Image (cartoon, grey):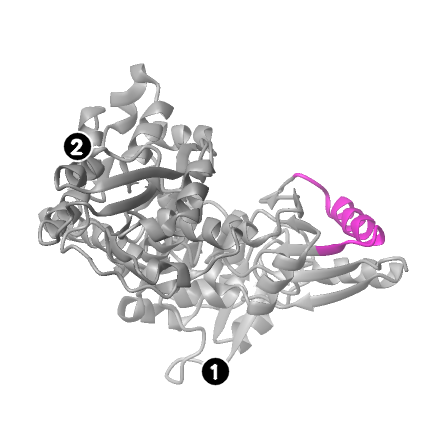
């Protein structure tokens, strides 16, 4: 039976990727093809299946990669091939998004489609700027208007007098280029020059900028602020509430551009924590976690687990790699019933617990030296220790355990290699002074990031950029490679690193 295609017109929301609907996210995950716009948050594409074809048809302030007619034809073509197509549109598909036109084409072609509404920037941007569009003390009416209409044409399709007379709050989308004309139309229609107005650029994102004024002053104010699209314009008395209700700008890391160099598979917790504090996270995974060159040593160790007294994990990756191989051999945690375990750090402890094992040793500090100190209370003479960890790990742990009399089988269960995705983008941002903080979560992230930077430009690129490290070992590596380390976490975990960045920023803000 021939597979029938289907199109989902999905609203991506206003910019904050957390504002997409659950159904919209489900559609992205199931899509064979994703056709997306300039205003759709790029991070949403990370939820797409590996097999998905991802096509950019960016429509940005008059600069179109593909015309609307071309986009319509592309959507219909892909669906007619029996594919599930997601048309990912910024905001809501039916609020000045031309989703209605795309639906018409699909209906006429007999192609099945669904519309998945999105949070429109018309309501989200004002909300993030501290401007409620309705308020009992100010107004019970709101109107949404396109700002894209040519204000110089002789006959307007908009009833400006009705808007000025009948709407308490007006919201204009795509109106920045026509701001002067919009203001003229509104004042001519009867709105006083003292009417409050707000311009919100990149609303709901860490790059959000809000400029306020009155109809009389806003043109000059906007020109001085050099505001460019995309901008949501709000007109009405509710704008005055911003002085009391603004909230996103109060987040402690609001607007800070922070590079996350951690492997993509592990970056989400750090990105989520920093984003929640208002930062704009720039993901540049310097490393990727890959299998070892040879599984034979690990397979042999698993076959002879009865010979081991201790199993020591130094990372979440080590736990995951060990158990993946254990299960692949048809075994389960029951074969570890006689083995004692030790871990470095709460994240590793938590990962081990996911497999049903509670660690016997969890040192107070999260580094190899602390594990050694903890083992000083144990009798290791004649004991056999299995140490599954990264190929690049430091040698201090197995060496010290051997000095205590243990027989240590130090096995590489994974290795790290350079990822290098987005190198040109990061170099460009550093060159444009578009980065505030770079985070390093391991010595390997430092080494691979340093390899990215041309030696003759190193000092210039890093000028004014703070370096944040997860702990002293990583900090030492960074200093050895020429970095100035500004922030070192006292607790060597992701929450500890976030807290260190937060405290550093508070001190910097207090000084300024």
Instruction: Magenta stretch: give its range.
Output: 65-85
Q: Which residue occupies 45% across, 31% down?
A: 420
**Where residue 387 sits in the image (x, y, percent)?**
30, 44
Dot label at residue 280: none
As drawn, the residue found furthest toward the bottom would be 136
Judging by the rendered image, the residue that carries numbered circle 1 is: 140
* Side of 460 relative to 303 (left or right): left
Q: Earlier in the sequence, mark 2 or mark 1?
A: 1
Q: Position of residue 137 (x, y in %)?
A: 37, 83
Residue, x 15% and y 53% (percent of image)? 503
Closer to us: 282 or 299:
299
Rendered view: 390 above or below 482: below
Q: Which-is-in-front pick, marks 2 and 1?
A: 2
Magenta-highlighted stretch: main secondary structure?
A: helix
Which residue is identified by label 2? Answer: 476
Residue drawn at x 46%, y 52% as measured from the top left: 326
Classify 329 as above or below 333.
Answer: above
Crowding at mark 1 (Cα within 10 Å: few <14, some 14-19, many 20+): few
Image spot of residue 96 (x, y percent): 63, 60
- The quadrant in which residue 85 appears is bottom right
Separation of marks 2 and 1 at Cα, in angstroms: 60 Å
- In the image, taking residue 9 as reference, residue 109 lies left or right, namely right
Relative to 67, 455 lies left or right: left
């Amino acid at each position: 039976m021939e597979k029938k295609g289907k199109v989902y017109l999905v609203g991506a929301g206003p910019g904050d990727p957390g504002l997409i609907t659950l159904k919209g996210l489900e559609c992205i995950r199931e899509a064979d093809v994703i056709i997306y716009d300039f205003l759709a948050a790029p991070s949403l594409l990370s939820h797409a299946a590996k097999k998905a074809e991802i096509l950019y048809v960016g429509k940005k302030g008059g600069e179109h990669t593909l015309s609307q007619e071309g986009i319509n034809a592309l959507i219909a073509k892909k669906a007619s091939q029996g594919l599930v197509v997601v048309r990912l549109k910024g905001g809501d598909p039916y609020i000045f998004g031309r989703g209605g036109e795309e639906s018409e084409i699909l209906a006429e072609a007999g192609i099945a489609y669904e519309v998945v509404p999105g949070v429109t920037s018309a309501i989200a941007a004002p909300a993030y700027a501290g401007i409620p569009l309705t308020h009992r003390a100010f107004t019970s009416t709101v109107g949404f208007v396109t700002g894209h209409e040519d204000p110089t044409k002789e006959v307007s399709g908009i009833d400006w007098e009705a808007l000025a007379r009948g709407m308490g709050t007006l919201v204009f989308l795509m109106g920045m280029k026509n701001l002067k004309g919009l203001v003229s139309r509104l004042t001519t229609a009867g709105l006083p020059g003292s009417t409050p107005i707000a311009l919100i650029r990149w609303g709901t994102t860490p790059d959000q900028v809000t400029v306020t004024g009155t109809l009389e002053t806003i043109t000059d104010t906007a020109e001085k602020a050099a505001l460019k699209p995309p901008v949501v314009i709000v007109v009405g008395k509710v704008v005055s509430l911003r002085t009391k209700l603004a909230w996103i700008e109060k987040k402690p890391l609001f607007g800070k551009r922070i590079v996350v160099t951690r492997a993509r598979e592990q970056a989400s917790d750090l990105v989520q924590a920093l984003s929640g504090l208002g930062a704009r996270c720039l993901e540049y995974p310097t490393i990727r976690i890959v299998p070892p060159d040879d599984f034979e040593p690990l397979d042999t160790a698993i076959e002879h687990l009865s010979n081991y007294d201790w199993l020591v994990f130094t990372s979440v990756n080590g736990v995951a790699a060990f158990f993946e191989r254990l299960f692949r051999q048809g075994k389960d945690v029951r074969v570890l019933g006689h083995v004692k375990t030790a871990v470095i750090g709460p994240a590793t402890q938590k990962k081990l617990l996911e497999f049903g094992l509670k660690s016997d040793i969890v040192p107070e500090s999260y580094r190899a030296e602390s594990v050694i100190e903890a083992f000083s209370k144990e009798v290791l003479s004649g004991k056999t220790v299995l140490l599954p960890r990264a190929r690049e790990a430091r040698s201090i742990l197995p060496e010290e355990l051997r000095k205590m009399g243990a027989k240590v089988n130090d096995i590489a269960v994974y290795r790290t290699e350079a990822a290098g995705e987005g190198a040109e983008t990061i170099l460009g941002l550093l060159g444009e002074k578009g980065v505030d903080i770079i985070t390093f979560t391991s010595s390997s992230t430092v080494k691979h990031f340093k390899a990215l930077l041309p030696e003759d430009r190193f000092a210039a690129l890093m000028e004014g950029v703070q370096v944040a490290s997860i702990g002293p070992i990583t900090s030492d590596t960074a200093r050895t490679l020429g970095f100035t380390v500004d922030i070192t976490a006292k607790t060597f975990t992701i929450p500890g690193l976030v807290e260190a960045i937060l405290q550093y920023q508070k001190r910097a803000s207090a000084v300024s």
